[in-house]
Amino acid sequence: MILTIALLSGREVILEVDPECRLRDIKQAAKGQFDVSLGKILTQSGEVLQHSIPIGQQVMDGETLTAT
């Protein structure tokens, strides 16, 4: 699945991830692109993503997520 991770500064990165991956995997991939640590990651509706649930069960393909 494809996800866009956006920082509050407006910087964005597009990631291709496995729907079964966990939030920690997405944070690691985005950290490598942004070169900053990420706090919470929010869905478009403002919900905080959960670490224990596969990403494919929390968001839809193509969604833009906001990192704080």
Image: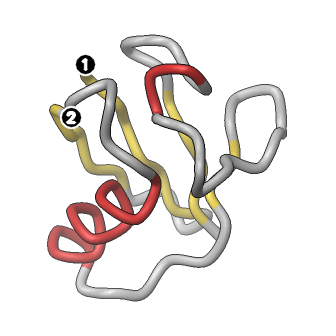
Where 50 sits versus 65, above or below? below
Q: What residue occupies the far right of the structure in this picture? A: 46
**Secondary structure of residue under mark 2:** loop
Residue 45 image position (x, y, % from top left): 81, 27
Q: Which quadrant, please, contains the N terminus?
A: top left
Whichever of callouts 1 and 2 sits on the residue coming sooner in the sequence is 1
Where 42 sits versus 56, above or below? below
Q: Tag 1: Cα neighbours inside 10 Å, few (<14), some, or many (≥20)?
A: some
Picture colour scheme: secondary structure
Q: Name which residue type carries label 2.
A: Val
Q: Which quadrant, please, contains the C terminus?
A: bottom right
Q: Which residue is mark 2?
A: 17
Q: Name which residue type carries label 1.
A: Met
The image quadrant that residue 8 belongs to is bottom right
Residue 15 image position (x, y, % from top left): 21, 40
In whole angstroms, how far apart are the C-alphas of marks 1 and 2?
A: 5 Å
Residue 1's disc is 1
Where 36 sits versus 10, above or below? below
Which one is in front, 9 or 37? 37
